[in-house]
Amino acid sequence: MADEAKPISPLKNLLAGGFGGMCLVFVGHPLDTVKVRLQTQPPSLPGQPPMYSGTFDCFQKTLVREGITGLYRGMAAPIIGVTPMFAVCFFGFGLGKKLQQKCPEDVLSFPHIGASGWLSWSFTTIVMKERERMSCIFQIQASSGETKYSGALDCAKKLYQESGIRGIYKGTVLTLMRDVPASGMYFMTYEWLKNILTPEGKSVSELSVPRILVAGGIAGIFNWAVAIPPDVLKSRFQTAPPGKYPNGFRDVLRELIQNEGVTSLYKGFNAVMIRAFPANAACFLGFEVAMKFLNWATPNL
């Protein structure tokens, strides 16, 4: 059972979640760049080696060709959007927990925690979908050598000119397919591990920094174990030229399986899993630190 030491404050979750998300992006973006480039690299020609042979090869080539800034390519869009994105995510999580309590003292079960996680990313998709698409576009643009978009505003303007508002929000369904089930696993795993790692006689709120990092990192791994197949489909769909997949993700799925096999749905798996632990450990640590500060500074908020 999940221990609630204090009444749930969705507003504090909103503020602390934004800080946690900033920590996640800073730590995890380099391997997110590698993941997207691996997922969207074109099939190699007969007798020719692939553009990237794996996670380390992609990381090394990006670093050599573009320097450290290449690994942070496209971070402007998520870093601008990360505060509202994760703020809304943790707000939705806090609101979901609060709505399921009959009184503030109620302790929620882990299925209730999972349901709150589903709600959290349903909210978040509304905020994040257009920024995530632009981030993917910039990551691919840098590796191709072509400069079509000079920045986030220029990208949004040209996408709108090409395909209207649907061009900016392309991939929303796939984002929901990825995030709703994965987020339930994410928060449920984190709360479960916090309880497992809490020493007997201690409160969950007193958990040490190393144990928070372990719980957050493993929660990130479980999250991506669920999320990566729809994430591959989303990356392909969002970076494809207009009109390439008229039937949406079904066309992407059919093409991937026919041309590259079922294992193509796990492209970038190593990069995702290497990134998942430190990035999500940083996210939850940032969230918990910010929450402790808010509980101290504004106890009645």
Image: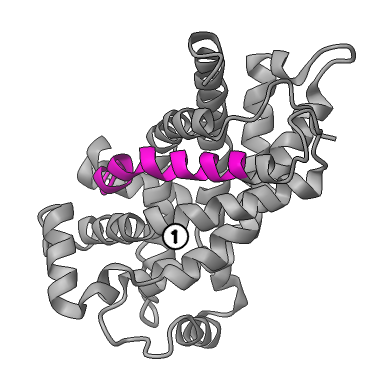
Q: Is residue 109 above or below residue 282?
A: below
Farthest residue to the front: give it: 103
| Towards the viewer: 157 or 271 | 157
Q: Is residue 73 above or below residue 148?
A: above
The dominant secondary structure in magenta is helix
Q: Position of residue 88 (x, y in %)?
A: 46, 44
Looking at the image, residue 121 sits to the left or right of residue 126; the answer is right
Farthest residue to the right: give it: 200
Say what secondary structure mark 1 lies in.
Answer: loop
| Towards the viewer: 60 or 6 | 6
Residue 77 on the magenta segment: yes
Q: Can residue 222 be seen? A: no
| Towards the viewer: 301 or 21 | 301
Residue placed at 50% from the left, 14% from the top?
298
Q: Quadrant of residue 47?
A: bottom left
Q: Can residue 148 be seen? A: yes
Q: Amino acid at mark 1?
A: Ser
Residue 158 on the magenta segment: no
The range drawn in magenta is 71-95
Q: Position of residue 186 (x, y in %)?
A: 65, 46
| Residue under numbered circle 1 | 53
Residue placed at 59% from the left, 59% from the top?
180
Residue placed at 67% from the left, 28% from the top?
214
Looking at the image, residue 182 sits to the left or right of residue 125; the answer is right
Q: How many marks?
A: 1
Q: Position of residue 235 (x, y in %)?
A: 41, 66
Looking at the image, residue 38 sits to the left or right of residue 93; the answer is left
Instruction: Answer few, some or many: residues within 10 Å of disc 1's Cα (few below 14, many 20 plus, some between 14 and 19).
Output: few
Its colouring scheme is one colour
Residue placed at 55% from the left, 58% from the top?
179
